[in-house]
Structure formats: C-alpha cells, structure tokens
Image: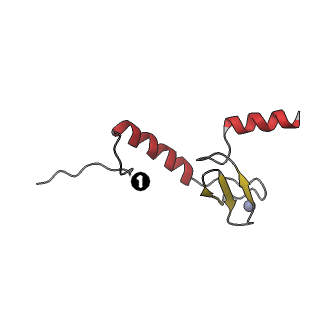
Amino acid sequence: MTRKKKTYGLRLRTRGGAAIQKRWTNIMLQMKQPHKCPSCASPKVKREAAGIWSCTKCGYKFAGGAYVPSTKLGQASARVQTA
Ligand SMILES: [Zn+2]
C-alpha cells in the first residue's frame, strides 16, 4: 500500500520545504478569495497580474497589492496623499 501525501487544493511545486509551501498556500487562498470592488462594491474583483486588479462586473481596473487588492501600507500611503 502506498501512502498518499496530504495536499491542499493548491500546491507549490518547488523546493523550499513545508514552511514555504504553507505560506504560499495561505497567500494563494487569500488571493483567490472574492474581493470587493471599490467602484461597484460587488465581490467580483480578480487579479490580472501582480498589483493589477480588475472587476469582472463593471470592468473597473485598479492598482493594489501584489497578492491582495489593498494592503495596509497602501492604505497608509493613501491617507498621506489626501492629508
Ligand atoms: Zn466593480
């Protein structure tokens, strides 16, 4: 009998060990979650490339974090610009 390795839905096929695989999986899961559109507020935002996000409903395209549409650092910089 062969033992099957436990895998998550997403798996990083590279070297680096379990710690990096887990971290990568967490980031990927966060990335694939439905994100709220800043224009029409519907959770239809998908990542186009690193830092580029677009809403599939209204077509709104905006820049954000590499793996999440809005990062804490981005929010902080936005606050500085408006002040
Ligand atoms: Zn939208």
Query: Closest to the observer: 76 or 30?
Result: 76
Query: Which quadrant would the C terminus be assigned to in this image?
Result: top right
Ligand 1, image quadrant it occupies? bottom right
Query: Would you say 30 lies left or right of 55 here?
Result: left
Report whether the residue tagged 1 is closer than 8 Å to ligand 1: no
Left or right: 79 as drawn, with respect to 51: right
Please, what secondary structure does the residue beneath circle 1 have? loop
Q: Residue at x 72, y 39 (%)?
A: 74
Q: Amino acid at mark 1?
A: Leu
The spot of residue 51 in percent (x, y) is 64, 50
Of residues 42 and 68, the one drawn nearer to the viewer in this rendering:
68
User: Pointer 1: what residue?
Assistant: 10
Q: Quadrant of residue 39?
A: bottom right
Left or right: 65 in relation to 83: left
Q: Position of residue 43 (x, y in %)?
A: 67, 57
Residue plotted at (54% across, 54% down): 32
Q: How many marks?
A: 1
What residue is rendered at 66% in x and 54% in y?
52
Q: Give the quadrant of the N terminus.
A: bottom left
Quarter of the image for residue 78 reads top right
Which quarter of the figure has residue 79? top right
The single residue placed furthest to the right in the displayed view is 83
Colour scheme employed for the rendering of this structure: secondary structure
Q: Nearer the viewer, residue 58 or 48?
A: 48
Residue 55 position, x and y percent, is: 69, 61
Up-down relation of residue 52 to residue 79 (above or below): below
Residue positioned 44% across, 46% down in the render:
25
Q: Residues within 10 Å of mark 1 (few under 14, many from 20)?
A: few
Q: Is residue 82 left or right of residue 35?
A: right
Q: Position of residue 69 (x, y in %)?
A: 66, 48
